[in-house]
Amino acid sequence: MVPNLITALTGPINELEQRMLDAMPAIERWFRLEWMEHTPPLYSSVDIRNAGFKVAPVDTNLFPGGWNNLTPEMIPLAVQSAMAAIEKICPEARNLLIIPENQTRNPQYLANLAQLQNIFSMAGLNVRIGSIDPDIKETVKLKVGNQELVVEPALRHGRRLGLKYFDPCTILLNNDLSKGAPGILEEVYEQFVLPPLHAGWSVRRKSRHFQSYEEVAKRFGKLMGIDPWLINPLFTSRQGVDFNDSGEHALDELREDVDAMLTKVRRKYKEYGIKETPFVVVKADNGTYGMGVMTVHDAKELGQLPAKTKNQMSLVKDGQLVHDMIIQEGVQTVERMDGEAAEPVVYMIDRYVVGGYYRAHSDRGAEENLNVPGAHFIPLAFEHGISPGDSVGASAPNRFYMYGVVARLAMLAASYELEATDPDAEIYD
């Protein structure tokens, strides 16, 4: 079920959106068959760009924060989906342990943790929060609105991870492991650790994800009879980039990649009669929080970067140096909230869309990265109460349906990606 939500975009639906609405039964059957063969991530969120002529995911988060931005009307769907996920993983589960990010007292992140705890508690689990931060040596009580959030130090008991007097069946990571998986999380064989450790940013690469997404987009494009480019951002990757190298030829290879990508995009724009100016987004191949991201319209711009930009591009979360970059076709956004550039962020638990919000920024344009400080979040609102008997989009064209489809394609790509990178997978000749 995909909730029918009000979006900022209220103009006539475009051809791509209409085709998806018309093909809804075939699309849902296609997804159903895919989930018979592949396991969705426990939860995920997807940043989507709607340029009018194409709609594409630009980032897929397997450790989503921001659950506090979902409206109260969305929580029942989230709870239902959480129940379905847990029933598949560990039907007899009673206890669930959430592992949060280290060293954070950010009120928004704490509100996110509180919401996650509420969702899984309402799904019928005893939920506690256990930190793997070595600085957390005793229980910490934090005020989150009217709620008290209790964070306890996680403890290792043999091959199991838990808390004092609390032994969980499932470990839910809300920590993206940018610095790698600490020893306390390794070789936990008797419990379910979700997402798996190889989903962390010390291992995961955006280029690998979009390689999987390209495969999914081609298969879906064949089903729909459309050019996969309409839902897929072109990309390439480059290793060994050093933005701090002041040498004359330091970024030559990256410039060549950007120039080649711009040429490919211009060709597609010409094919579809698109008058917009092509651009690419250069970003760190691993990492989150919108760090290490820049918009480029001409490869020559890379020869004139200020020192501040070079430094920003070479570092991601936790001060980790990066040398691997992804060069991705830029997808502008036609969405606006109160005149500000905005992009939908879609949230999923298991294989179900549970809601989302708009990320908007007053100081950023339609071609720029909106996931930067100063962004604010506008919850999507339900058009009407939804019940199990409702048919999706029955009252009016469901503007959210297309976003839900694209988000689920990205989630499916994530399942392909995790299967392909699983270090414990059996390999057959």
Image: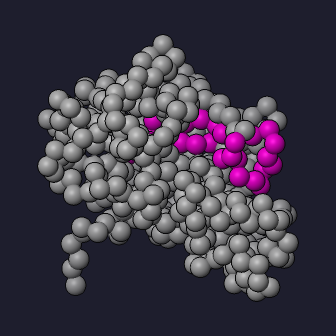
Q: Quadrant of residue 356?
A: top right
Quarter of the figure with the N terminus: top left
Side (left or right) of 100 relative to 188: right
> Residue 404 location in percent, x, y?
52, 44
**Which residue is at the front of the view, 93 or 410?**
93
Magenta stretch containing residue 250, yes or no?
no
> Residue 37 location in percent, x, y?
28, 60
- Magenta segment boundaries in residue numbering: 344-373
Instruction: For residue 327, say whether it is visible.
Output: yes
Q: Is residue 239 above or below residue 177?
A: below
> Residue 217 location in percent, x, y?
51, 64
Which residue sits furthest top? Answer: 146
Magenta stretch containing residue 365, yes or no?
yes
**Which residue is at the front of the view, 301 or 30?**
301
Quarter of the figure with the C terminus: bottom left
Side (left or right) of 300 relative to 351: right
Instruction: For residue 396, say whether it is visible.
Output: no
Write the residue at 58% across / 67% down: 322
> Residue 172 location in percent, x, y?
33, 42
Q: Quadrant of residue 343?
A: top right
Write the residue at 58% across / 39% down: 400
Write the residue at 59% across / 79% down: 240
